[in-house]
Amino acid sequence: MNYLNYAIQLAHMVEGQTGTNPPVGAVIVKHGRIIGMGAHLKKGDKHAEIQAIDMAGADHVKDATMYVSLEPCSHYGKTPPCAKRIIDVGIKKVVYAAKDVTLPSTGHEMMAEAGVDVEYRQDTQMEQHYQNFFDSKASEFPIVTVKVSASLDGKQATDEAESKWITTPAVKQDVFQLRHTHDAILTGSGTINHDNPSLTVRMEEGSHPTRVILSKSGNLNWDAQLFSDEQAPIYIYTENQHLNTELDNVQIIYLEHCQIDTILKDLYQKGLGRVLVEAGPNVTSQFLSSSLVSNFILYLAPKVIGGQGQFQYYQTPYVEKLDRIPQFEIVHSEMIDTDIKLVLKRK
């Protein structure tokens, strides 16, 4: 049995609920039986390794093997080092899938020096997955994913602003899952005023991300439906010093200049590690042309809308040289009903 895969599956199950920390899964096996499992459930909570030890019982894990998706930590943060706890309870062997390259001293070394049999069983996909978190930790910017639903000719709507519905209902369900794996959804005031989205997760036991609204002018429709529910906080970034509200779940952040790097840095400081951008062409274009986007998810409907492209999802006021344009690589593609989903990473 591939117990390391079980640990990796646990990590994927808690995707989007660990804030600025990476999602990690751990499985403890003894005499061919799983005796403990764990996952890092939220930032500041017990790490996956400790959860698994607690489930098995510290008195029962001596000479057991632990499988974990990420190398156990060796430093003191909000919780003690997992590597030290593994040593103290007498776990005999640790197998992990990805190295933690952010630490000056490694858990691998700490455990090996204490006599634990440590095996780095490299999983390339998990290492690539965790690299986003390592980069985010180093830069103190969240992991940013831009999501766009468009026609084959790149339109989010017709020139008369008709956009319901370009893609199929099956895409909507996939987007709900995508939202579930992010800490925040970021959009512009134009999307709020024209499309009136709820930006929630309509799925069983779905986690509702924080809603983030960019509005330089502060021109907002306070009757929009997302202001009437309190399932998640709302942050509004604006340059309008006179904008205010009495809504309890809305926080207004005043900036001299609403620049996306400043906003993203602030969101990271608030503990939001994964941000999904769902917006119109103006905000979408600002993000796609920046170096702050890690992932781009594009849903393409087999339709050609035409017109003058007022709602073309990517627009710039300039023409860039081909060798200087933003470049992505396709890492995954699939059919969702009659639509195509492309998952791309920044090159």
Image (spheres, rainbow, N blue to C red):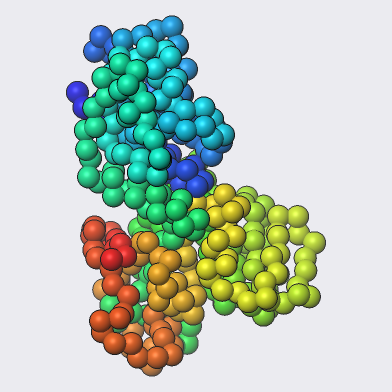
In this image, 206 relative to 30: left or right? Answer: right
Quadrant of the image for the C terminus? bottom left
Q: Is residue 294 above or below residue 220?
A: above
In this image, 294 relative to 30: left or right? Answer: right
**Which residue: 24% across, 13% down?**
32
Measured from the top left, where is residue 233 in percent x and y? 64, 54
View extreme (left): residue: 1
In this image, 232 relative to 182: left or right? Answer: right
Closer-to-camera residue (292/229) = 292
Closer-to-camera residue (63/108) = 108
One can see residue 197 in this view: no
One can see residue 254 in this view: yes
Q: Is residue 212 above or below residue 241?
A: above
**Image quadrant assignment for residue 154:** bottom left
Quadrant of the image for the N terminus? top left
In this image, 193 relative to 261: left or right? Answer: right
Measured from the top left, where is residue 206 in percent x and y? 50, 45
**Which residue: 57% across, 66% down?**
263
**Which residue: 30% across, 62% down?**
345
Closer-to-camera residue (125/300) = 125
**Which residue: 29% across, 87% down?**
321
For the image, the number of numbered tags is: 0
Q: Is residue 30 above or below residue 271?
A: above
**Image quadrant assignment for residue 65:** top left
Measured from the top left, where is residue 79 in percent x and y? 54, 30
Measured from the top left, where is residue 312 in percent x and y? 39, 83
Q: Is residue 175 above or below residue 37?
A: below
**Image quadrant assignment for residue 36:** top left
